[in-house]
Image (cartoon, helix red, strand yellow):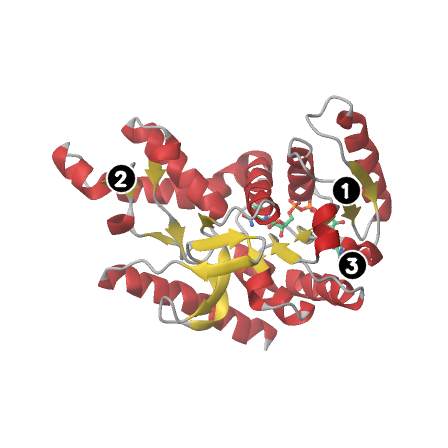
């Protein structure tokens, strides 16, 4: 990133709906950001949201300028987060949103490109792995500079559930949901740890059945459907997951997050984006961590990747 941009840190949010505003609200507690620009096809909505957030600034832990802007502001931004688009309705899968959201994502990214955006682009609209690919193509940015929220939210759900059921702090549950942010995701249990102890060894010692892990995975995978049935949308969890990714970029944390990153063959596949443990810092998604997968898990990864590839081929040509 250019030095003058680092001196004044600006972020842009495109899409001031439930997910976008949960993210924007959580950013009021993030130190070191000078400006947050809100953009929405409904400019009045962006203006109203900006005014509402400004009121909270008096009591927030940090100071930043929040305003409704336009794509022209993108040239001065370090990070743009896209949460624009249609959300799942009860019973609808994420993949069913592909056509409508691809057209929105493409339009947004063409505007970013036209206005000289040259920072890190973070994509959250669904189906997020495919939208990340669409955003990469339309934005003209290097592939490392385009990051999907991937399975960062799913992984948070997994760590929480594992911690609760096994009786440990979720911060000590080192396990990732991998693959599509959606129904074909999976957990590599052989690469899962409690602190630095193998999760499978622990279960063996405690005589806990492996079926318990499958139950945990199914509960985690279906949690979004349950929340949508109950309250029509999910947004607080993803809002904070997006804050986690943006902080990693702005603070050059180089932390490992299961974002949707461009595959260069680390898991045997190339050409598209999918959730894999990735180093995230100011240079974007700089390195994918290769985990040794069992044959079964490799099959699951291949199926998940192939599902995304086929959805892109069938719907987006
Ligand atoms: P929402 O509350 O309907 O908000 C969408 C916003 O996008 C609205 O304010 C629209 O006006 C705006 N918008 C629509 N088209 C455009 C456009 N062309 N340009 C600019 N703004 C536009 O939806 P919600 O916030 O609930 O969901 C947003 C997206 O996030 C959906 O695709 C969800 O499926 C997705 N989610 C992703 C998650 C993840 O883990 N990645 C989790 C939850 C939801």
Q: SS at mark 2?
A: loop
Indicate whether 177 appears above or below 267: above
Quadrant (top left/top right/bottom left/bottom right) for the N terminus:
bottom right
Q: SS at mark 1?
A: strand
Report x, y in % for residue 81: 66, 51
Residue underneath mark 3: 75
Q: Quadrant of residue 140?
A: bottom right
Q: Is disc 2 surrounded by few (<14), some (14 to 19) or many (20+) residues within 10 Å?
A: few
Identify the residue at horizontal 82%, vertical 49% (top origin): 42
Q: Quadrant of residue 236?
A: top right
Q: Is residue 45 or residue 50 the one in the foreground?
A: 50
Quadrant (top left/top right/bottom left/bottom right) for the C terminus:
bottom right
User: How many marks overall?
Assistant: 3
Spatial CA span between label 2 and label 3: 43 Å
Furthest residue in direction bottom, as rendered: 317
Spatial CA span between label 1 and label 3: 13 Å
Residue 9 seen anywhere in this rendered image of the structure: no
Report x, y in % for residue 75: 78, 59
Mark 2 or mark 3: whose residue is earlier in sequence: 3
Q: Is residue 227 or residue 193 the one in the foreground?
A: 193
Spatial CA span between label 2 and label 1: 40 Å
Q: Disc 3, ligand 1: is the CB inside 8 Å?
A: no
Query: Which dot marks residue 196?
Result: 2
Mark 2 or mark 1: whose residue is earlier in sequence: 1
Indicate whether 314 appears above or below 130: below
Q: Disc 2, ligand 1: is the CB inside 8 Å?
A: no
Residue underneath mark 1: 35
């Amino acid at each position: 990133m250019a030095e003058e941009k680092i001196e004044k840190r600006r972020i842009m949010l495109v899409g001031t709906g439930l997910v976008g505003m949960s993210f924007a609200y959580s950013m009021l507690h993030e130190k070191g950001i000078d400006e947050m620009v809100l953009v929405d096809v409904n400019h009045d909505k962006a203006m109203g949201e900006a005014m509402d957030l400004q009121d909270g600034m008096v009591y927030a832990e940090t100071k930043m300028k929040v305003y409704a802007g336009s794509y022209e502001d993108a040239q001065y931004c370090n990070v743009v987060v896209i949460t624009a688009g249609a959300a799942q309705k009860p019973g609808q899968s994420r993949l069913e949103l592909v056509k409508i959201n691809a057209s929105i994502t493409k339009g947004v990214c063409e505007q970013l490109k036209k206005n000289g955006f040259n920072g890190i682009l973070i994509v959250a609209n669904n189906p997020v792995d495919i939208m990340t690919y669409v955003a990469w193509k339309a934005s003209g940015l290097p592939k490392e500079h385009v990051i999907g929220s991937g399975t960062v939210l799913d992984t948070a759900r997994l760590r929480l559930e594992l911690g609760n059921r096994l009786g440990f702090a979720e911060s000590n549950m080192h396990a990732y949901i991998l693959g599509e942010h959606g129904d074909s995701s999976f957990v590599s249990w052989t690469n899962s740890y409690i602190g630095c102890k193998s999760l499978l060894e622990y279960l063996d010692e405690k005589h806990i059945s492996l079926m318990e892990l499958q139950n945990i995975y199914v509960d985690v995978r279906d949690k979004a459907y349950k929340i949508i049935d109950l309250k029509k949308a999910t947004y607080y969890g993803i809002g904070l997951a997006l804050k986690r990714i943006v902080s990693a970029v702005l603070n050059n944390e180089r932390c490992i997050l299961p974002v949707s990153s461009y595959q260069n063959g680390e898991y045997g596949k190339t050409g598209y984006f999918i959730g894999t443990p990735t180093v995230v810092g100011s240079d974007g998604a700089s390195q994918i961590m290769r985990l040794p997968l069992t044959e079964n898990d490799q099959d699951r990864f291949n199926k998940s990747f192939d599902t995304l590839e086929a959805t892109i081929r069938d719907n987006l040509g």
